[in-house]
Every structure is written in C-alpha cells, then in structure tokens.
Amino acid sequence: MTGITPAQWVQKELLAGRCLQPVREQAKAYAPANIALSKYWGKREPDFNLPLTGSISISLADHGTHTQLQVIDKPEHEVYLNGARQGADTGFVRQVKAWLALFLPASISLRIDTRNTIPTAAGLASSASGYAALALACNDLCDWHLDYTSLSALARLGSGSASRSLWHGFVKWQAGEADNGHDSVAYALPARWPQLRVGILTVSSAVKAVSSREGMGRTVQTSGLFKQWPAQAKGDMAIIEQAIMDHDFTGLGQTAEQNAMSMHATMQAAWPPLVYWQPESVAAMHQVWGLRQQGVEVYLTMDAGPNLKLLFQAANTATLLQHFPTLEVIQPFPANHS
Ligand code: DP6
C-alpha cells in the first residue's frame, strides 16, 4: 500500500542519518503497561500496525516491563522472559526478532532480558510495555537520541498498543493519516488524577487461545457489528478525553465500560465467534454491576482476555478490596510521577 516496507521507513526516515549499530555493550529501560480506556480494535494497515481510530489509555505506573540488552558474540539473538530462555520458534521470539531486524544488521546479536512486574497470569504482561521498553533500550544502546514521539512510532511497529506505553499517566494515540504511519504516534495528555485507581481482577489464568492481533483481524474481516465500531470509537474517545480534562469520573467510567463492552460485542459477532470471557469473568461483571446498584461507583473494562480491570476512586478502595480480596490496586499517579 505504501510502496515502502516498515524496515525501509525506519532506516531511511525515522533513523535517517543515525547509527544502526550498538555504540555500547549494554543498555536497559523500563516502560509501564497501559490499559486502554477507549480501545484500539482494528487496523487500517497491518504491516505498520496503523489503527482505524485513535485510542486513550492510562499507564500502570510501576507495573510494566524492565528490559536489558547485551551485545553477545553468538549467531542469534537470545530472548529471556522473566529469567527463562524462550525457544526460537515461539511467536514471541519471532516477533521480537522481526522488530529488531527493522534496523539492526543481521551480524549483531543481542541477549534480551525482559522482566514483567505485572502478574503474567493477569494476561497483562503485554507486548505494550515490552516493545516500549525495547524501543527505549535500543535508543540508548545505539545512541539515537530519538524523541518519545519517534520512539512511539517505533514501538508501534512491534505492537500497536506499545505506542502508548512510552509515558506515564493518560496517553492518547492519534490514528494519523499517512501511509507510512509517521503521524500515527501517541502523546501524553496534560492531566493528572491522583485519586484515580485501576484494579486488576484476575479471574482466570487460562492462556488466551487467540492473540489480540489475530482477534482484531478476524473481527474486521467477519463481524457485521464491526461496521459501527469506528464511529463509536471516535465518539467515545472524544468523551473520554473531555472527562479526563474535567475529572468527570462518571463520564470516564461509563464511557470506558461501554466502549469495552461494545468492542467485545464486535468480537462476539465475528466468525468463528470470539469470546474471551470465561464464566468467572461474567460472574465478576455481575458483581461490579451489583456494587454499582448499591451506590459504589466502580466501572469495568476488559481487553482480549478473561480478566477485568476496574476503574474507581481512592475513597472506594477499602470497599472494593472487601468484595474482591485478590484485587491488585494500582495508583496510576503516585507522588513521584509527573
Ligand atoms: C484489546 O496492541 O496487542 O488491548 O497491534 O496487533 O500488536 P497489535 O495488537 P495489540 O492490541 C491491543 C488490543 C486491546 C485494546 C487496546 O489496548 O487498545
């Protein structure tokens, strides 16, 4: 479609004039995981991970990925996830290698140690913080001095949602219009919300059978309900951005929950149907709705997996922990983050 491959774009435009080789032996970086409040679901161009619509997320502070890179004298890259060497034939390793090959000469091998500080069972040890940390670490290893906007585009080529994991707090990924995706980048929204909490409710550690990538492709191709999604996603994003600016928790929570449920409706209308929910997920949803009926203002959002993420404010933390004792409560705006 663009007449240019992602590797050509990265080397000739994004990294134009920069060294494509490591200038030091090692480098490390951290990036937070993020939860979309208005979701990215559907691509207009899969090779560049270009989305049909923009999205807005909240980053999860110290829940994310630490990545360490080391230049090694071996024929191939070695990839470790939480200390365990990953087989060369796994999808994870193949994708990481393909991303590195966007710029790194084949003669260079790296040992890549990636450690997630988010429970892997929560299905949150996602590619988002992984590729954002990898982009940051490569920026240091090769001394590129790229700004975060450019790093956001580079991380996006690994995984779309990674474009949002370069920053803490609220982040907006604008869809962009260019064929090569140079304008499909994220940026931090100028808002803090110290009372906001995100709760991770792990209801099932069942490994997801269908990746987000495959799931969104199938939905775009086969779901009749997907036709209405882009318009809704755009509208929801505008409402959520305004709610963030106004600290309107009800507007934020209601729109985020409806956005997530609508996204899941598009998947459920795909063929074969795509239902990431487990019975425990549905039970937990009813619990959330029951609490809301009792006046506890809590909303849910879900991604391509069975677990719930709850949105609430600090004052309700104790009540929620009483009802969901295993809830992992995250404070997206701790005192030390700007
Ligand atoms: C449901 O970013 O994992 O979490 O771009 O194909 O790597 P790829 O997909 P990915 O999809 C995330 C989908 C989502 C919604 C979101 O995070 O916005």
Image (cartoon, rainbow, N blue to C red):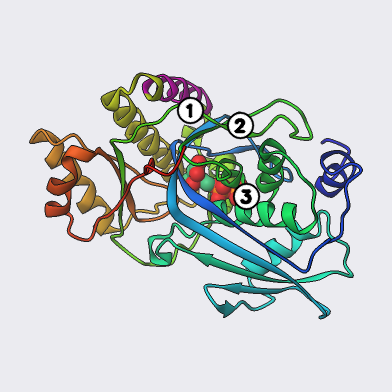
Tag 3 or tag 1, which sits nearer the N-term? 3
Viewer-nearest residue: 7 or 12? 12
Would you say the magenta stretch is mainly helix, strand or loop? helix
Which span of residues is magenta-colored?
A: 229-243
Nearest to the observer: residue 259 or residue 65: 65
- The residue that label 1 is drawn on is 233
Q: Quadrant of residue 4?
A: top right
Q: Which residue is mark 2?
A: 52
Of mark 2 and mark 3, the one earlier in the sequence is 2
Q: Which residue is mark 3?
A: 159
Which kind of residue does numbered mark 3 sit on?
Answer: Ser
Q: Name the residue type under label 1.
A: Ala
Residue nearest the viewer, comparing 254 with 277: 254
- Give the total number of marks visible in the rendering: 3
Q: Is the CB of mark 3 within 8 Å of ligand 1?
A: yes
User: x%, y% of residue 295?
Assistant: 10, 33
- Are circles 1 and 2 on residues that touch, CB within 8 Å? yes
Tell me what residue is drawn at x 32 percent, y 50 percent.
308
